[in-house]
Image (cartoon, rainbow, N blue to C red):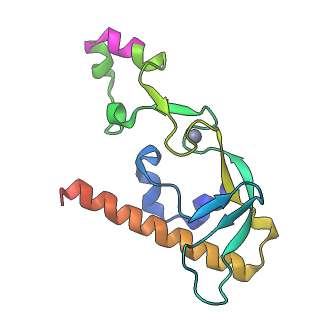
Amino acid sequence: MQMQSVVHSAGVREMDRRETNQKWYYSFDEKRMVIILKEEPEEGEVNEVPAKYEVCGTCNGKGSHVNPSIDSNGLSAEDFAEDRDFEEMYFSGGFDVSCNECKGNKVVPEVNWDSLTQEEKDHVTQIIDDHYAYQMEMAWERKMGW
Ligand SMILES: [Zn+2]
């Protein structure tokens, strides 16, 4: 988790995690506990790195979160003051949906950074940065209504 905040571009933290595609890798092989980085790696490129399970950072291990369509633009005290039923529903989990990132598993595969060489770390970091830069661009375009 700590590693993520280092490698992700600053603007990503301002985006709603629930609406951001967190899957920066190609696939995860649970049997072998490896993350497969790209669908089509360059020749000779490292394309598998060891993985470990981490508590999901989107739902903090709850497996669910409030539907982002309800509050991703922020809610104010007035929103609740005007509608007590809404408030009760909101705080009792009535608007909760299965977590967008872990799909209710409460944990997600994370790169086991400690076991990587520096070269591998740089390679993976680059892939993650590219993914989030692209996500930010997409979010920005959506915001602009393109
Ligand atoms: Zn989750």
Q: Main secondary structure of the magenta part?
A: helix
Front-most of residues 96 and 7: 96
- Check residue 124 for magenta coloring: no
Residue 15 relative to residue 122: left or right: left
Total number of numbered discs in the rendering = 0
Image quarter in which the C terminus is found: bottom left
Q: Is residue 3 above or below residue 105?
A: below
Q: Position of residue 81 (x, y in %)?
A: 30, 14
Q: Position of residue 129 (x, y in %)?
A: 51, 70
Front-most of residues 40 and 105: 40
- Name the residue: 70% across, 72% down: 48
Image quarter where ligand 1 lies? top right
Residue 45 relative to residue 134: left or right: right
**Outermost residue to the top:** 84
- Name the residue: 33% across, 35% down: 69
Q: Position of residue 105 (x, y in %)?
A: 63, 38
Q: Position of residue 73 (x, y in %)?
A: 31, 39
- Name the residue: 33% across, 22% down: 77
Magenta region: 82-88
Q: Is residue 104 above or below residue 83?
A: below
**Outermost residue to the right:** 115
